[in-house]
Amino acid sequence: MFGSYNRFQNKVYKDAMFVSSLDFITSLIAGVVIFSVLGNMAEELDLDIRNVAKEGPGLAFIAYPEALSRLEWLPQLWSVLFFFMLFLLGLDSEFALLETFLTAVYDEFPSSRRHKVPITLICCIICYFLGLPCVTQGGQYVLNLMDTYGGGYGVTFIAICELIALMWGYGVNRFCDDLEFMLGTRPGLFWRACWLVISPLVLVFIFVYSFWEHKVIKYGENYEYPVWADGIGWLLALISMCQIPLWGFFILLRNCWNVKKVVTPESSWGPGDSEARIKYFQRRSTGLVMTEKLESQGIDNPALMIESNVK
């Protein structure tokens, strides 16, 4: 989704490597901090480290504040900085998640970009009310249910469908041709093998194994969710997973007399930048390898031009 804001020839793989490297370093530093704090607490309390804190929110809101309170130099200041860091972390995560949804809306309805502020405000208000149950007395149970079912199964299933549709439906060679046209370099054999075979197999294994090992979730050691709550969790998972097969069946049913139309791209498909679009289809029609460097630096998403014109 964020690619909509990039120039057509933006070296997106460099951005991906940079962000992934920062994420790896941050996780490494956080792991060192967490285990050093837990180890010190386990030593002082004379407990096994597994009994000091459990995974999840308890680690951030129980174990860490306890550790910060034991600091000799200004524990109040470190506590304020720690929770302010958590606030910023949640805020920037919310930006990314909300912008992903809003970009899909703007791309589908380009005219809505003229009303970006009120649409964003309405979405934020809706998300605020949807999040209120998580801060009630039973909010931790609701949060645990949403965290377990709302992400894991749905994200894995969607990733499997995307890989199969793109690499086996659209074609890995055609996809590599598009990347070569856009970036000037062609993905190597390793990446093609991962996209075509390795990643789908690994994700399918994880998805099937998760179903096989599934048990009714618990909160803590003793509380087991009732059957109706487990059903609500599966409903949350199915809301995202069923979108792909249901809409696919609907489109196939609507075009049952012309199945070829179902797998034929729309007329608007292709690069959004006008100069890149012309050269792209010229290359495809002649069957040449797309290695020519483009001079155009236009934004790939034509919907963004509406916002530029408004400004």
Image (cartoon, rainbow, N blue to C red):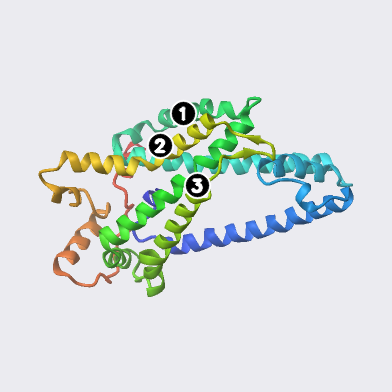
Q: Nearer the viewer, mark 1 or mark 2?
A: 2
Is 184 or 178 nearer to us in this picture? Answer: 178
Query: What is the number of the mark on residue 121?
Result: 1
Mark 1 is surrounded, within 10 Å at the Cα level, by few (under 14), some (14 to 19) or many (20 or more) other residues, namely few
Q: Is residue 83 above or below residue 165?
A: above
Is 260 or 272 nearer to us in this picture? Answer: 260
User: Whole-Å distance between the Cαs marked 2 and 3?
Assistant: 13 Å
Give whichever of discs 1 and 2 has the lower sequence position: 1
Residue at the image point whose x is 14% and y is 69% from the top: 286
Query: What is the number of the mark on residue 152?
Result: 3
Q: Amino acid at mark 2?
A: Ile
Q: Amino acid at mark 3?
A: Gly
Say if mark 1 contacts mark 2, CB within 8 Å: no
Q: For the view shown, which residue lies furthest in the bottom direction?
A: 189
Query: What is the number of the mark on residue 144?
Result: none
For label 2, the residue is 239
Q: Quadrant of the C terminus?
A: top left
Is 2 or 306 nearer to us in this picture? Answer: 2
x%, y% of residue 138? 63, 27
Give whichever of discs 3 and 1 has the lower sequence position: 1
